[in-house]
């Protein structure tokens, strides 16, 4: 492999190094790149949303297919523009009420079923004979104790450090192990991203790596 | 020369050490065969057992900030599906995912062209329907009528003119939803697609989020989990084994396995920093007591 | 009239759409199905229009900053030019090979992914400076973290830490995450109910 001859790769490499320069200290090049990122990011999102969502799902059905059923969401959506003036900004409450109300209504039974019912069911403890091995029963018991003590900690502890009962202490222990596990995986995530960037610089750009 | 103080190492030394720890292994192209975890194997087996002609829905919900982890997952799911004759509908619930989906698909097409064994045809084996705003409403709406949700593909082609979509109306015609994500979209897929329409869901997420999805595996709300670059490397290994046994060629593109092997030194360094920090802390504490 | 449009009507709307949205789940009647599908289609359309407003706000914010010539004019100008350039490129196509695609893949992607990769350095520094076993709880966190980190490496696998990692993930970690999940589920359900019944009004701006 040889050094890249693509102008785009060189641009990407320059931007990568510019962001890395922040590790030394904040500087004008980094800030300019940051501003470029903000602009490109906003422009990108708008184009994607307009092209993929607004045009096929509201503009075309209403103005090309003349389906008048789409007039209501279009008018509701237009009310968002009331935000442009302080005097009329309150009108945006109407489209928000539609989105929040219908969203909350749809979510209500499903969130309860997913996060509460199914999870409580999965925590239920049965007699040891119900499990394939003693180990499986012990694991189920640990999950049972863990879920109960964590919930107890969230709902009944008042945050004071003194007089912590055994239930709250057990709950905290589970929380700490869980956070430790998440942190361990986060280390892997962030490092893999760094390796990815280094592979880009030394492989794709400089052509040193194969 | 300044005396080395274990309780106060300059951050610049830490930065340089971690940089070298991540960089140097890249020059030593050794890859380790990963041990396959049950949650990754479950996703692989599920797709492997789907009859040819089945349709899966792949949601590209990741952004550039997790690319080395999530992109190989998306590519390997597609490769696995195409090898088995399973068709893939691509969609995106995050704006960022839209163009990353196109890139992942073109990577897979290019790789398959190099093998020269099977040809992937857009519209027959794969279709990308693009991004839609209103995440929960989109997931629910697919359950009613995918045509109302996605009247066209990302290029603007009418969905009724796309051959592989002829017999797809809603989740009843979709064997599996695979969500590759760097945000909390899997929660929405579980809540709105699985709980409401009982469509099986598999999840591939950045390692930052992976630990959150274990409760859903145990309850059967998701069939399996591909977590971070570790899970990606396991899936990549399984798919490569399949390519090798089916077509007798060894895949050269192994981004996840390469990344996973290169991580080892840097991960050990992080552990070393934690230990050094604690040695420094306890030795200082001991000195104060004295 | 203003009070009606800003408070009464929105509160009435969340009540009606919320109650009907929840009820349709339990009532598989044809009318309920038609209502459900219509609302879903509308929701996708309405939410896409909220974003156009966001674009206008972005333009206004940076335009004002440039006109007021207070400090960050340079950065606002760069952001604005980049924004308009993306809109312009997008008008000519977003397919692979288009300028819009190239800008995304070669400007947005490298900046975003490098910004997040910086966290690897900060995390290494924090591991040394902040993760100290000052208490029993902190020691538990550290031990779990070290086992999980080592468990993902070939070194850890050779001393069976991969099996310990798997156990931590699928038993104590599961219990902790499930506890949070149930708590969040109960909280979200209560908040949804409060919004629908008009008890929670923060979304109306106090």
Image: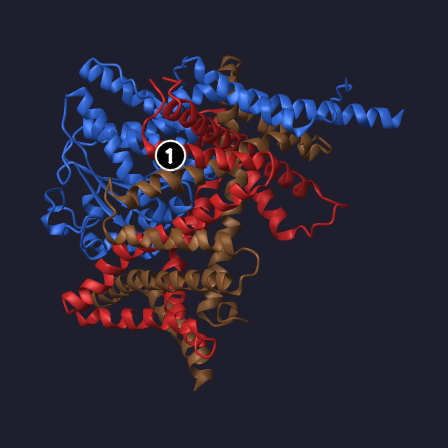
Q: Residue at x 54, y 20 (%)?
A: B20
The chain shown in brown is which?
C
Q: Position of residue A102 (x, y in %)?
A: 36, 65
Q: Is residue B233 left or right of residue C101?
A: right
Q: Residue at x 70, y 25 (%)?
A: B9
* Residue under numbered circle 1: B70
Please say if B272 is above or below C119.
Answer: above
Marked residue chain, label 1: B
Q: Residues within 10 Å of mark 1 (few under 14, many from 20)?
A: many
Q: Residue at x 38, y 69 (%)?
A: A80
Question: Which of C32 and B169 lies nearest the eye of the viewer?
Answer: B169
The chain shown in red is which?
A
Please say if B33 is above or below B78.
Answer: above
Residue B206 visible? The answer is no
Question: Which of B202 and C59 lies nearest the eye of the viewer?
Answer: C59
Residue A94 visible? The answer is yes
The quarter in which the C terminus of chain C is drawn is bottom right
Image quadrant in which you'd find residue B246: top left
């Amino acid at each position: 492999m040889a050094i890249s001859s693509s102008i785009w790769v060189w641009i990407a490499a320059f931007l990568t190094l510019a962001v890395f320069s922040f590790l030394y200290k904040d500087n004008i090049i980094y800030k300019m790149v940051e501003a470029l990122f903000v602009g490109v990011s906003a422009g990108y999102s708008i184009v994607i949303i307009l092209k993929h969502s607004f045009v096929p799902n509201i503009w075309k059905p209403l103005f090309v297919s003349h389906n008048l059923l789409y007039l209501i969401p279009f008018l509701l959506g237009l009310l968002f523009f009331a935000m442009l003036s302080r005097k009329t900004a309150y009108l945006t409450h109407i489209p928000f009420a539609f989105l929040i109300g219908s969203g909350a209504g749809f979510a209500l039974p499903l969130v309860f079923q997913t996060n509460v019912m199914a999870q409580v069911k999965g925590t239920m403890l049965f007699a040891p004979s119900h499990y394939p091995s003693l180990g499986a029963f012990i694991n189920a018991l640990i999950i049972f104790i863990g879920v109960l003590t964590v919930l107890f900690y969230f709902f009944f502890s008042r945050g004071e450090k003194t007089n912590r009962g055994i239930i709250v202490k057990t709950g905290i222990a589970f929380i700490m192990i869980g956070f430790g596990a998440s942190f361990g995986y986060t280390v892997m995530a962030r490092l893999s991203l760094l390796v990815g960037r280094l592979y880009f610089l030394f492989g794709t750009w400089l052509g040193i790596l194969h | 020369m300044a005396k080395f103080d274990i309780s106060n190492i300059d951050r610049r030394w830490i930065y340089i050490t971690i940089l070298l720890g991540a960089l140097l292994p890249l020059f030593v192209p050794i890859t380790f065969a990963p041990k396959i975890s049950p949650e990754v194997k479950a996703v692989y087996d599920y797709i492997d057992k789907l009859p040819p002609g089945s349709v899966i829905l792949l949601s590209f919900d990741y952004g550039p900030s997790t690319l080395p982890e999530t992109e190989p997952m998306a590519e390997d799911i597609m490769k696995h599906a195409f090898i088995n004759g399973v068709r893939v509908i691509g969609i995106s619930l995050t704006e960022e995912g839209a163009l990353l989906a196109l890139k992942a698909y073109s990577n897979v097409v290019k790789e398959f062209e190099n093998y020269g064994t099977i040809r992937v045809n857009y519209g027959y084996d794969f279709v990308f329907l693009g991004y839609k705003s209103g995440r929960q409403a989109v997931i629910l709406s697919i359950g009613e009528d995918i045509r109302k949700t996605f009247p066209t593909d990302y290029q603007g082609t009418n969905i009724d003119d796309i051959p592989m979509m002829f017999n797809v109306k809603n989740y009843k015609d979709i064997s599996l939803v695979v969500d590759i994500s760097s945000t909390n979209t899997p929660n929405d897929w579980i809540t709105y697609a699985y709980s409401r329409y009982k469509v099986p869901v598999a999840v591939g997420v950045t390692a930052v989020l992976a630990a959150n999805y274990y409760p859903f595996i145990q309850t059967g709300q998701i069939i399996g989990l591909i977590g971070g670059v570790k899970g990606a490397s396991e899936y990549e290994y399984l798919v490569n084994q399949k390519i090798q046994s089916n077509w007798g060629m060894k895949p050269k593109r192994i981004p996840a396995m390469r990344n996973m092997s290169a991580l080892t030194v840097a991960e050990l360094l992080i552990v070393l920093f934690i230990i050094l920090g604690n040695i420094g802390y306890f030795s200082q504490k001991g000195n104060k007591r004295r | 009239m203003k009070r009606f449009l800003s408070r009464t009507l929105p509160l009435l709307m969340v009540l009606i759409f919320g109650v009907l949205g929840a009820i349709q789940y339990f009532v598989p009647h044809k009318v309920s199905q038609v209502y459900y599908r219509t609302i879903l289609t509308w929701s996708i359309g309405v939410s896409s229009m909220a974003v156009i407003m966001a674009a206008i706000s972005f333009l206004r914010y940076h335009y004002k900053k440039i006109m007021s010539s207070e400090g960050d004019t340079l950065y606002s100008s760069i952001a604005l030019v980049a924004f308009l350039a993306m809109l312009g490129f997008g008008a000519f196509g977003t397919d692979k090979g288009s300028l819009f695609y190239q800008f995304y893949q070669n400007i947005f992607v490298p900046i975003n992914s490098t910004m997040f990769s910086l966290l690897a350095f900060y995390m290494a520094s924090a591991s040394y400076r902040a993760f100290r076993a000052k208490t029993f709880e902190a020691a538990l966190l550290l031990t779990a973290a070290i086992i999980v980190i080592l468990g993902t490496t070939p070194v850890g696998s050779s001393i069976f830490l991969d099996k310990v990692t798997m156990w931590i993930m699928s038993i104590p970690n599961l219990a902790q995450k499930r506890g949070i999940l149930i708590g969040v589920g109960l909280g979200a359900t209560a908040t949804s109910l409060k919004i629908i019944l008009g008890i929670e009004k923060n979304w109306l701006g106090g």
